[in-house]
Image (tube, rainbow, N blue to C red):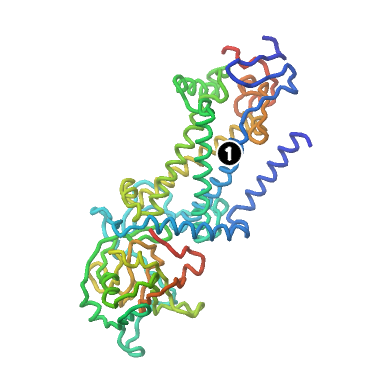
């Protein structure tokens, strides 16, 4: 196909005009955009207030015992990463925001399930191999961007891992919120001190995935920022067409059609 | 406005909002919402609460012993001064048919139990300890608590000079009557030491540490709640585990 005109795979509902400047598709439903941004605030407050609570006892051992697996015991998290100003303030935020975090998360999952968006997000057969191909591409081992649908295979794994981690955050959180009332849960997680550690590790995983997500958005597909705000996306800017890696081919014009073979 | 300008502006606003949020208390107007959430959380917590939910630390966990921190609000360890105040007694009053004033010997003559349980501190640490004392439900039976008593206030001779009043915390009656809620006078097989609330203190794993009044002097059954030293400062009143 020649440079300048693109047709789109018929499998997607996206419509592309011949003009680059007006070649815009609707990418994210308003409900997905709304829940995404509510989650940014809710998760941000949960993490910040959680770290403030953590700073009241920045270690994991029971009193009079040692803890196997945390090398940074005694080191408080820096003030700038915390929210809520003091222990009670942070607890009050944490135990209020948890409801918004849970309700918003459930609404999002219910929506993508009922509306069918999960098909673009949940990895299926072949995505493990594609994720490896994407990794090779990002490491300059592979020259051309692997073919992808709405999201590449690495994104699919990330966007599926995040709701799973959120569920784990809630389960481990309940275990340390109500260690006697929900004692069976706390016991199943190895007791309060370990459950608190699992809760912390889940938070670390969520922070890492969120930072990678933001980094990749900025460095690979900043054009997608528009789609999570207004819903619109220019498919001629797709990373696949630009063979985009972090900060590489960021401003390159589309070179090949989205359905070209690798 | 150009799209690029819009993105740059929203990015800048977002970044400054995040910076402003760091380490802050959050917006002033949110405090009403937070208080509302705290009240609703209490409804959920009380609905989940069961007298059959018992705290049971794993048998392999060692007692914290001397690693158990001691906290009090007075500048120095509060010690009951017999010479000045006479012999220590525990008053049980309020909505009761038989108000009591128990000496230590009388308290110890009530049915005693020893329980090995977790201590849950609001700061996030736990400590396994073995407590000896009398169930509060036993004391309530002896005092014949009236059915209108829905709350209990636990008062202390530990005094914060900047506040002027003694330490106290009030509880819901369900948590107070939990079988693991004790008036404890023994710790790890010894007489309770002044550092941990001697002569007697409230001890229960169903509440966070700050709800468990040490240096106990009075137990008052009440129709309404009466706040508490920490709950009046912003910590949640319920403080249940």
The answer to which quarter of the image holds residue B158 is bottom left
Quadrant of the rendering where the N terminus of chain B is positioned: top right
Check disc 1 and report its element: helix, strand or loop: helix
Residue A141 vertical position relative to residue A113 in the rendered view, above or below:
above
Residue A186 at what x, y percent from top left? 34, 50
Position of B174 compared to A151: left or right? left
Residue at horizontal 74%, vertical 34%? B4
Q: How crowded is mark 1: few (under 14 residues within 10 Å), some or many (20 or more)?
A: some
Residue at horizontal 34%, vertical 46%? A189
Q: Residue furthest top?
A: A1
Residue A8 vertical position relative to residue A73 in the rendered view, above or below:
above
Residue B12 vertical position relative to residue B125 in the rendered view, above or below:
above
Nearest the eye: B91 or B191:
B91
Residue B14 vertical position relative to residue B85 in the rendered view, above or below:
above
Position of A192 compared to A234: left or right? left
Chain under callout 1 = A
The answer to which quarter of the image holds residue B95 is bottom left
Residue at horizontal 42%, vertical 42%? A168
Residue B182 at what x, y percent from top left? 29, 69
Residue A149 at what x, y percent from top left? 56, 21
Question: Which residue is under mark 1?
Answer: A36
The answer to which quarter of the image holds residue B101 is bottom left
Residue at horizontal 37%, vertical 60%? B120
Position of A181 compared to B114: left or right? right
């Amino acid at each position: 196909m020649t440079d300048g005109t693109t047709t789109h795979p018929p499998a997607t509902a996206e419509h592309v005009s011949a003009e680059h400047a007006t070649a815009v598709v609707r990418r994210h439903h308003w409900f997905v955009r709304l829940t995404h941004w509510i989650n940014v605030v809710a998760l941000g407050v949960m993490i910040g207030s959680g770290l403030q609570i953590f700073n009241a006892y920045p270690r994991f051992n029971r009193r009079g015992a040692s803890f196997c697996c945390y090398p940074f015991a005694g080191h408080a998290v820096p003030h700038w990463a915390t929210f809520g100003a003091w222990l009670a303030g942070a607890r009050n935020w944490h135990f209020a925001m948890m409801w918004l975090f849970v309700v918003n998360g459930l609404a999002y999952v219910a929506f993508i399930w009922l509306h069918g968006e999960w098909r673009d997000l949940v990895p299926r057969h072949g995505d493990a191999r594609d994720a490896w191909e994407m990794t090779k591409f990002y490491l300059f081992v592979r020259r051309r961007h692997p073919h992808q649908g709405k999201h590449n295979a690495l994104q699919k794994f990330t966007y599926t891992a995040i709701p799973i981690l959120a569920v784990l955050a809630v389960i481990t959180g309940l275990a340390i919120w109500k260690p006697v009332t929900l004692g069976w849960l706390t016991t199943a997680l190895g007791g309060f001190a370990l459950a608190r550690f699992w809760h912390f590790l889940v938070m670390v995983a969520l922070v890492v995935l969120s930072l990678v997500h933001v980094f990749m958005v900025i460095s690979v597909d900043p054009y997608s920022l528009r789609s999570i705000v207004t819903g619109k996306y220019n498919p001629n800017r797709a990373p696949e067409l630009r063979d985009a890696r972090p900060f590489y081919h960021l401003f390159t014009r589309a070179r090949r059609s989205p359905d070209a073979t690798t | 406005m150009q799209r690029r300008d819009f993105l740059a502006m929203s990015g800048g606003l977002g970044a400054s909002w995040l910076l402003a949020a760091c380490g802050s208390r959050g917006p002033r107007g949110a405090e009403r919402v937070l208080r509302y959430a705290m009240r609703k959380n209490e409804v959920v917590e009380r609905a989940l609460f069961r007298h059959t939910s018992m705290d049971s630390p794993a048998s392999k966990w060692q007692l914290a012993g001397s690693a158990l921190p001691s906290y009090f609000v007075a500048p120095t360890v509060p010690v009951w001064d017999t010479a000045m105040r006479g012999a220590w007694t525990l008053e049980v009053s309020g909505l009761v048919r038989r108000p009591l004033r128990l000496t230590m010997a009388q308290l110890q003559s009530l049915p005693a139990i020893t329980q090995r349980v977790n201590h849950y501190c609001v700061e996030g640490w736990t400590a396994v300890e073995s407590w000896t004392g009398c169930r509060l439900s036993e004391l309530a039976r002896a005092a014949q608590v009236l059915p209108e008593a829905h709350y209990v206030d636990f008062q202390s001779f530990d005094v914060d000079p900047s506040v002027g009043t003694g330490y106290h915390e009030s509880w819901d009656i369900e948590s107070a009557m939990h079988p693991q809620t004790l008036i404890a006078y023994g710790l790890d097989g010894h007489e309770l030491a002044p550092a941990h609330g001697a002569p007697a203190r409230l001890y229960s794993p169903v509440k966070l540490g700050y709800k468990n009044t040490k240096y106990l002097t009075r137990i008052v059954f009440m129709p309404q709640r009466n706040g508490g030293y920490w709950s009046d400062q912003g910590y949640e009143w319920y403080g249940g585990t």
